Amino acid sequence: MVKPVTFERVLKSAQKAIEYIELKRSAAAVPLQEQGAARDDHFFIRESNDLVKLQYAEVAYIESMGNFSKIYTTADRRHITLVNLKNLEAQLPPAHFTRIHKQYIINHDHISAISAEEIRIADRFVLPLSQSFRQELLEKVVNRNIVSRTTLK
């Protein structure tokens, strides 16, 4: 703020600071896994001044934007929230979501194809697949569902 300062300007700045602190506190409040069985198919994010409900099934992937994350849905919507990718990864259920790159988390249900260096999501999005996350993805998602040449007895 630049002097001389008006009371209205101080009040407006204080309100902005309070909103920012509340936004950060609410984003890190309770991990999604601890919210109970009734909440096992969706989660809420704070976007601007709204709480937006997202179904796990509609989330295609999540992209890191530093302290923010951009959530892409199968309906071609984008949501930006003040939660970094690391915190989102810790709160999302690992049965549905896996990190594939330092910038991306994907929803297993929307995987269309996996190559050595890329992954296709919902037949529309092509994302990089990091070698350091590739093995975990294959073990978690592919290996248990792969059709092999021989049957195991």
Image (cartoon, rainbow, N blue to C red):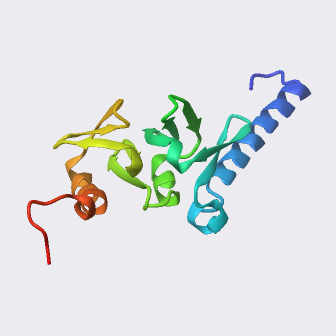
Residue placed most toward the observer, 67 or 37: 37
Q: Foreground residue, 111 or 64?
A: 111
List the single residue furthest toward the right: 7
Q: Residue at x 81, y 37 (%)?
A: 15
Q: Residue at x 54, y 30 (%)?
A: 77
- Could you say where residue 82 lies in the image, as x and y percent from the top left? 59, 42
Q: Nearer the viewer, residue 149 or 118?
A: 149
User: Where's the N terminus, which quadrant?
Assistant: top right
| Residue at (60, 44) in percent of width and height | 54
Residue 26's spot in the image, x, y percent?
Answer: 69, 52
Tally the marks.
0
Q: Is residue 15 visible?
A: yes
On-image quarter of the C terminus: bottom left
Residue 73 appears at what percent x and percent y?
A: 50, 36
Please indicate whether residue 108 sits to the left or right of residue 73 in the image. left
Residue at position x 59%, y 39% in the image: 81
Please tell me which residue lies in front, 1 or 81. Answer: 81
Q: Is residue 37 above or below residue 92?
A: below
